[in-house]
Image: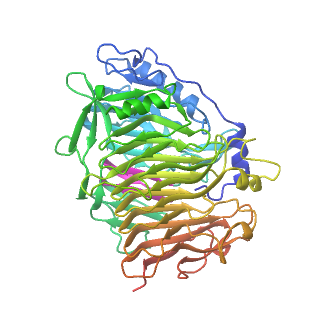
């Protein structure tokens, strides 16, 4: 969400200041993942593997150069993963200080996060979009980056003043922190060292041990199955599930915490690691129920290990029919960093297949294709993949199971989507009817951002009529449609779609943290009508559903193209005892109005209370 920051100026800054980067090669600081030799798989030119024997200065230079290329490359095409073999990096006197830019993954290659130790800092700072990099400093568009599977021993040696006070991770959507062990200093999710307004808008942490953490300006956040020494500050919507040390939520909405003692259903994201014999493997964690705390505290994360030889390691040049042939033969799929044009579906049909993307591998629909089609079979895991709409409208970007077909998924081995992101518009024109369609039963969605772009590359999403042209050009009717039963979402971020952002038709659905921003760009109220009702709710539970639960939900309005536009409800659900909403809210960001929070209940989020949420602690009302 992008708040009160001067959206047109922001779009101009982003559109005119793009850095379109090429593929990054390895340097002397890295063990190249080129042609397979000495047991190193061929991960292609966009993966850099560091060895603990490499001088710190060489690693630092490599990461500095990568950040310089990617810090402003929001709509760029480069993708890269920087992977650290087991060992220690940086010293007390010469720490390693890394900054992470767009489309960059930084991950350890240990079986446990404690197998890779970085002495120093790994950070993301605000972007300052005005005054030659000195003003309008925000993290609202710090998207698409990953940090995982390592221990960070914070050491600020060499940093002066404010920068030495914390490890800063100022980010918003499509950013995950997983399997981290952070100590030696504080973690701040807000960059308070720059000029204002310093806004940040959402993120996700899982399976991590955290020090004292400052939330700062983060408007919504999910921390799942972690440990935290302390948590400071909340803005609108802070959610904790299965987190040791999480704040109590008894005073909601003062402060606006939502805390679940355990996570009802979880499965940690698969991760690449190097075993004691130097062999590359993928660990696939098992699904677990009613869990609390980290998965690796007393040993290896429960699950199964798959050798890298059992994966087809794909590169953007590989045709889809080759990928599908390998999947049909029983191979798993590892997507190396890059942009994949997909003119026919990648088809995942076999139970327990793993599709793992690294370095923000991106699938782009071509000629109206459905880029990824997953059968409703047990145990399929899709992780670390971004899916873009293309110029020709696709019916859907990721389909899980058939709406009217046989779906054989099972409760103890759910289909799982982890860090799967969607984009309609932005770097190019995008069109789809629906982004994510879940038809199968027993599916877990563990962190997703489903985004119809509210800004993008100048000349593609802008026209003579500005936002009016975007409304007609980058089209996406529905963000997420859930038709299957027993579907769970932990960290569901969906924004800017032209009808319901999320519509949930399946029984026994469950969401833990929902964040939504309605579209900025309807030209007129007539363009934003659901029959006779003004607007479309940000979260809709189907009228026939009898059992559904939501913990911690927010719907925001910023109708910048026409501030007179109204939306009747932020949430719409059937009125029945089995459908329950806990801690939901709406908020106005200075344009437009949401008349009610849910089903006519709750005051209007209008311009008389900009930035002040309207809360409904529970629905139905007691």
**Above or below, comparing residue 546 to residue 188 in the picture:** below
Decide if residue 125 is on the left or right side of residue 459.
left
Expressed as whole percent of the image width and height from the top left, the position of residue 288 reads: 24, 54
Q: Quadrant of the N terminus?
A: bottom right
Q: Is residue 171 visible?
A: no
Looking at the rendering, the stretch of residues picked out in magenta corresponds to: 202-228
Dominant SS type (magenta): strand
Residue projecting furthest to the right: 464
Residue at figure coordinates x 37%, y 35% from the top left = 155
Expressed as whole percent of the image width and height from the top left, the position of residue 318 reads: 48, 26
**Above or below, comparing residue 193 to residue 97 in the picture:** below
Residue at figure coordinates x 27%, y 64% from the top left = 261
| Quarter of the rendering containing residue 222 | bottom left
Residue at figure coordinates x 25%, y 36% from the top left = 114
| Quarter of the rendering containing residue 532 | bottom right
Numbered disc total: 0
Expressed as whole percent of the image width and height from the top left, the position of residue 462 reads: 75, 47
Residue projecting furthest to the front: 405
């Amino acid at each position: 969400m992008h708040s009160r920051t001067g959206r047109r100026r922001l779009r101009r800054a982003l559109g005119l200041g793009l850095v379109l980067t090429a593929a990054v090669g390895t340097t002397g600081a890295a063990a190249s993942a080129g042609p397979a030799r000495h047991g190193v798989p061929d991960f292609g030119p966009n993966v850099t593997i560091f060895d603990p024997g490499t001088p710190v200065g060489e690693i630092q230079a490599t990461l500095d150069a990568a950040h310089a290329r990617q810090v402003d490359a929001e709509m760029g095409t480069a993708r890269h993963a920087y992977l650290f073999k087991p060992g220690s990096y940086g010293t007390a006197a010469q720490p390693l200080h890394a900054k992470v830019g767009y489309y960059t993954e930084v991950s350890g290659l240990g079986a446990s996060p404690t197998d890779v130790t970085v002495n120093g800092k790994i950070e993301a700072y605000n972007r300052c979009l005005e005054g030659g990099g000195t003003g309008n400093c925000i993290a609202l568009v710090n998207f698409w980056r990953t940090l995982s599977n390592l221990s960070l021993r914070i050491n600020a040696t060499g940093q002066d003043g404010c920068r030495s006070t914390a490890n800063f991770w100022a980010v918003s959507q499509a950013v995950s922190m997983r399997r981290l062990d952070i100590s030696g200093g504080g973690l701040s999710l807000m960059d308070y060292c720059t000029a204002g307004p310093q806004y940040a808008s959402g993120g996700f942490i899982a399976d991590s041990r955290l020090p004292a953490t400052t939330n700062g300006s983060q408007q919504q956040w999910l921390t799942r199955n972690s440990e935290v020494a302390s948590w400071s500050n909340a803005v609108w919507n802070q959610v904790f599930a299965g987190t040791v040390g999480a704040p109590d939520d008894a005073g909601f909405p003062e402060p606006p915490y939502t805390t679940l003692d355990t996570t009802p259903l979880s499965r940690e994201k698969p991760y690449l690691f190097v075993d004691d014999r130097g062999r590359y493997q993928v660990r696939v964690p098992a699904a677990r129920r009613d869990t609390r705390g980290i998965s690796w505290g007393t040993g290896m994360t429960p699950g199964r290990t798959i050798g890298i030889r059992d994966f087809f390691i794909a590169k953007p040049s590989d045709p889809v029919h080759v990928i599908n042939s390998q999947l049909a033969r029983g191979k798993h799929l590892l997507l190396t960093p890059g942009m994949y044009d997909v003119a026919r579906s990648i088809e995942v049909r076999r139970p327990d297949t793993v599709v793992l993307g690294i370095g923000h591998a991106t699938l782009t629909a071509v000629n109206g294709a459905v880029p990824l089609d997953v059968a409703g079979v047990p145990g399929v895991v899709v992780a670390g993949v971004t899916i873009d709409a293309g110029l020709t409208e696709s019916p859907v970007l990721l389909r899980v199971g058939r709406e009217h077909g046989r779906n054989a998924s099972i409760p103890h081995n759910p289909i799982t989507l982890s860090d799967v992101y969607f984009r309609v518009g932005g770097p190019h024109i995008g069109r789809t009817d629906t982004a994510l369609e879940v038809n199968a039963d027993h599916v877990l969605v563990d962190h997703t951002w489903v985004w119809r772009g509210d800004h993008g590359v100048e000349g593609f999403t802008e026209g003579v009529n500005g936002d009016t042209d975007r409304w007609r050009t980058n089209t996406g009717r529905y963000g997420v449609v859930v038709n299957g039963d027993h579907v769970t979402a932990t960290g569901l971020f969906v924004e800017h779609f032209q009808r319901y952002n999320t519509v949930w038709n399946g029984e026994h659905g469950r969401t833990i943290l929902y964040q939504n921003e309605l579209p900025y760009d309807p030209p007129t109220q007539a363009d934003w009508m659901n029959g006779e009702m003004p607007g479309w709710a940000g979260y809709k539970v189907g009228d026939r559903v009898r059992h559904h639960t939501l913990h911690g939900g927010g719907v925001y309005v910023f109708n910048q193209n026409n501030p007179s536009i109204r939306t009747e409800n932020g949430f719409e659900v059937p009125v029945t005892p089995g459908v329950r909403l806990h801690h939901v809210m709406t908020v106005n960001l200075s344009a437009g109005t949401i008349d009610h929070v849910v089903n006519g209940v709750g005051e209007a989020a209008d311009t008389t209370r900009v930035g002040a949420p309207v809360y409904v602690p529970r629905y139905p009302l007691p």
